Image (cartoon, rainbow, N blue to C red):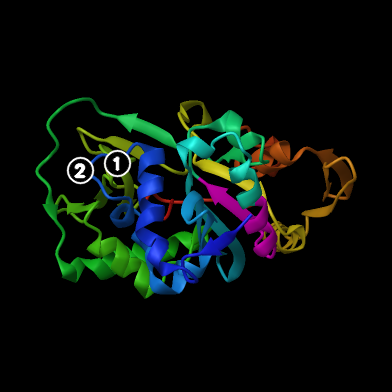
Amino acid sequence: MNVKTLKDSPEKLNECVELIEQAFGYNDNYSYKEDFSPLFHEHNLQNCYFIEEEGLVTATLLTLPKMLEYKDIKLPALFIGGIGVRDENRGAGLFRSLLETVLLLNSHYALYLLWSDLSQLYEKFNFYEFGLIEENDLGEEKPQDLKEFPPEDLETVITSYQSLSSHTLVPHRTPEDWHDLFQSQSIDHMTDGKGHFYFLNKGMDLQGVCHERHPLNSPDLAGYSNWCYTPENAERVSRYMGFLRLGNLEALSDFIEKTSNKRLFIVERNTEGLITVSFDGDYYDLSEKDFIQGIWGPGQIEEWIGLIPPLVIFGHDSI
């Protein structure tokens, strides 16, 4: 199997994008390269993988390293997207082989995250639903009068986002990340003129969705599906946030031990694939799925609620 990166073969970029757009059913109104532009920065091409057979790209898997942060505690994660297999090569195990290769090359990350609606498929590869999103649709009323917020308000939005790490686990955004967000042609950046700022739509995937707002308690918008990432009422949760797979357990356990004041930590992954944890001095064996969802939902373990900060990934950061 000939696994390459776009850093090694930049001439294959357009062919990779074309395969991905075919796999995702893109039409001419949208551009994957525009919707997920951070993947294609020159410094990230080394993280964009593909399989080449007889001169053709047959499978793709693009990744984006991210540093998650809670207060002054960091957690390295790898975001995964751009998964595509050429139609005539489906069923040959290319995705499994490519994924295993990529994970082996990136084994130091504590978490691997991807976004899809194919739960049964990705559970086969140890990716499990995580996170809680309350989806509130105010109906089909015409949206309120909104306008694009001016450059002088950008710092207000940045400050609001940075404050989130005091109580949630969020991706660190660099100046380049903010530039990508504010310059994105597939996301609308709007304000109601009353100190509320909204990020609406995103390419083909998040049309009609308000997927980020500042401050977080800004009112819902009519005409949009409004996402709340830290719902207070779990009974109103209507969707999961994404898929998560465990990576480097030492790094993850260190994070969990620090954030829980040493009440919870990972002991080991045993020979049966179960995760042994210590909680308040007692030991428990959990499946990876139960462990992930026990911490970040859906279906959090009641005794762990509030112990570990909620993980929040907004629409712009998902790939």
Circle 1: residue type: Met
- Residue 319 in the image: above or below residue 153: above
Q: Quadrant of residue 295?
A: top right
Q: What segment is highlighted magenta in the picture?
A: 100-114
In the image, residue 105 lies in the stretch drawn in magenta: yes
Estimate the x, y position of residue 54 in percent, counting from the top left: 52, 54
Q: Is residue 220 left or right of residue 116?
A: left
Q: x%, y% of residue 129?
A: 58, 37
Q: Gap in Å between the C-alphas at discs 2 and 1?
A: 8 Å
Circle nearer the viewer, 2 or 1: 2
Identify which residue, 106 or 13, lies in the foreground: 13
- Given residues 97 and 142, the one toward you in this image is 97
**Who is closer to the viewer here, 103 or 213?**
103
Q: Is residue 161 visible?
A: no
Give the residue number, with chain letter if any, for mark 2. Answer: 29
Going from the N terminus, do you reach mark 2 or mark 1 first? 2
Q: Residue at x 63, y 32 (%)?
A: 299
Residue 208 falls left or right of residue 260: left
What is the quadrant of residue 33 in the picture? bottom left
Q: Position of residue 224 (x, y in %)?
A: 24, 35
Bin the neighbour count of mark 1 within 10 Å (Cα to Cα): few under 14, some 14-19, many 20 and up: some
| Residue at the image point whose x is 66% and y is 56% from the top | 101
Q: Secondary structure at mark 2?
A: loop
Callout 2 touching callout 1 (CB < 8 Å): yes
Name the outermost residue toward the front: 54
| Amino acid type, residue under disc 2 in the picture | Asn
Element class at badge 1: loop
Which numbered circle lies on residue 204? 1
Q: Please give the name of the residue rendered at 40% of the width and 73% of the height, measured from the top-left corner.
A: 42
Q: Nearer the viewer, residue 112 or 228?
A: 112
